[in-house]
Image: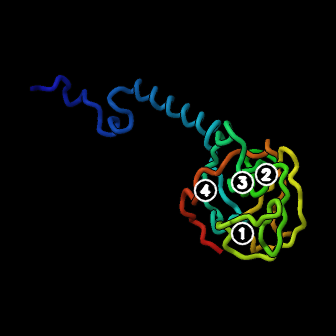
Amino acid sequence: MASNLTESQRPSLWRMVLIGRQPKFTLVRIVALIAIIFFVRQYFLLPIRVMGPSMLPTYQDHGINLVNRAAYASHEPLRGDVVAIRTSGISIMYMKRIIGLPGETVAFHEGRAIVNGKPLPEPYVIYPCEWELPPVTVEPSKYLVVGDNRSMPADAHTFGQTERQRIVGKILLCKNLFASSVPSR
């Protein structure tokens, strides 16, 4: 069976690979893909880079993770969730773990978190600490957040109560999305 196209009418191999046989259809697919990526990025998934040791060893410094922005559309944050917290803008956030819910009393004694008078089981806290902090009652519509790396002195650690509207979403992945290219310290 002979081909209807002569050698000079056939598209080149590069054009076939990059554009395909139907350039208009390829353009429509590219525009649709860009729109889908923008929509997902805008409303569902937000990539973030971990900067600092406060969540070690659960999340490595310089690792990249995804924030699920829709995680709390149907329910409020739960104890143990690792969340992204907006500070002054969308590009600067903290990654912390929720340990205290609204209305609860949280204290630290001999490095252990005490919630409503009972020790909080925290298998993710590997590095020991000696934190001694008096009881604090979490205000309504606020959550008490803290990092997993408690080996740092409490005064050098960023933690405390955060408003519900500052919680951007839940960290989607438990470990780093990509291996860090920056050597650890």
**Which kind of residue does numbered mark 4 sit on?**
Ile
For the residue pair 34 and 75, the one nearer the viewer reads as 75
Q: Nearer the viewer, mark 4 or mark 1?
A: 1
* Residue linked to disc 3: 79
Disc 1: CA contacts within 10 A as few (<14), some (14-19) or many (>=20):
many
What kind of element bears circle 3? loop
- Report, in whole angstroms, how far the alpha carbon at label 3 lies from the one at label 2: 7 Å
* Residue linked to disc 1: 149
**Which kind of residue does numbered mark 3 sit on?**
Arg
* Residue linked to disc 4: 64
Disc 4: CA contacts within 10 A as few (<14), some (14-19) or many (>=20):
some
Q: Nearer the viewer, mark 4 or mark 3?
A: 3
- Tell me the quadrant of the picture where the C terminus can be found: bottom right
The reply to whether the C-beta atoms of the residues labelled 3 and 2 are less than 8 Å apart is yes
- Give the percent coordinates (x, y) of residue 68: 63, 44
Label whose residue precedes the other's in the sequence (2 or 4): 4
Q: Does 125 sit left or right of 107 as displayed? A: left
